[in-house]
Amino acid sequence: MIKSSVTVSLVDEARGGPFVYWDDLAAACGKAKGLGYDAIELFAPGANAVDKGELKGLLEEHGLELAAVGTGAGMVIHGLSLTSGSASERERARGFVKEMIDYGGEFGASAIIGSMQGRHGSEVSPDQAMGYLKEALVDLGHHAKAYDMPLIYEPLNRYETNLINRMGDGAALCESLGEGANVVLLADLFHMNIEETTVADGVRDGGKWIGHVHFVDSNRRPVGLGHTDFGPIVEALKDIGYDGYASAEAFAYPDSDEAARLTMEGYRRWFG
Ligand SMILES: [Mn+2]
């Protein structure tokens, strides 16, 4: 059974980014529950941004799960990257992610490596960057084992990383790390619309490694407001036996409430 989730951002520096609800966690939880969501996905400035007791109370009050926690604040606030040319910066990046793994872990939520993967460039060759990325994923996936939750790695489109852009390459990366590495893939339908031959083919290429889905239309607007053909994608997700979250990582377009409502409408249409 694929479950529904909606993103909540508390990160000022990410203003205008692809998150449905903003700023007010308590209000977002109330609205998510009102629309029938199973969970929220939290994008926070760091592991100390929201008191764990407060989050626990809100989730319990509304009968919501925590689907996952983002780690991109390490990049957008602190400029950290797991593939930086500086060893100390790579170490700080891992430290930031470990704190987020520890934070989410207590709620049974995985941490997501998206923008924190960084990119290769003048100081770091493609081979070096892939080496740093693999080392980091193994270390962080191992760290996540304490919570019996996998680490989620997200291939991004070419404008956001030059490391891994396609699900097939992501699956090969996971294969190379091995099952024991405790790393799964995030299938973000927006990135895939740019990079894959078809999004459905990309889902099949990711196959058993897919552990999380960002459920969004072709233009990063809520499901139904772009040109994505969801039928074949949903069929592919069923074929691979996917049973994680379909999480709304979409612009608050035309506004947060409508984006959340439209995504839930899409979720019910495609997965209900
Ligand atoms: Mn995403």
Image (cartoon, rainbow, N blue to C red):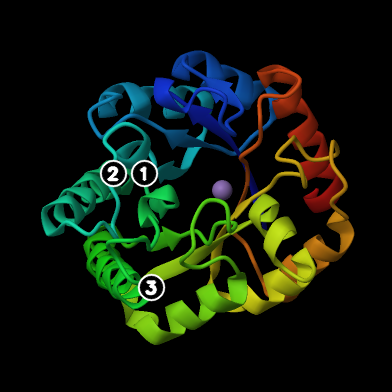
Q: Name the residue beneath numbered marker 3.
A: 126
Q: Secondary structure at mark 2?
A: helix
Distance in Å between CA atoms under marks 2 and 3: 27 Å
User: Mark 3 or mark 1: which comes first in sequence?
Assistant: 1
For badge 3, the amino acid type reads: Pro
Q: Nearer the viewer, mark 3 or mark 1?
A: 3
Q: Residue at coordinates 16% horizontally, 48% vertically from top-left?
A: 92
Q: Amino acid at mark 1?
A: Thr
The spot of residue 35 in percent (x, y) is: 70, 26
Mark sitting on residue 206: none
Q: Nearer the viewer, residue 111 or 62?
A: 111
Nearer to us of marks 2 and 1 is: 1
Give whichever of 250, 85 is nearer the camera: 85
Disc 2 marks which residue?
Answer: 100
Type of amino acid under label 2: Met
Q: Is residue 51 above or below residue 265?
A: above
Earlier-in-chain disc, 2 versus 1: 1
| Mark 3 element type | helix
Residue drawn at point x = 60 percent, y = 69 percent: 166
The foreground one among 172 and 241 is: 172
**Closer to viewer: mark 2 or mark 3:** 3
Q: Is residue 139 above or below residue 253?
A: below
Tell whether circle 3 marks a residue whose Cβ is less than 8 angstroms from ligand 1: no
SS state under label 1: loop
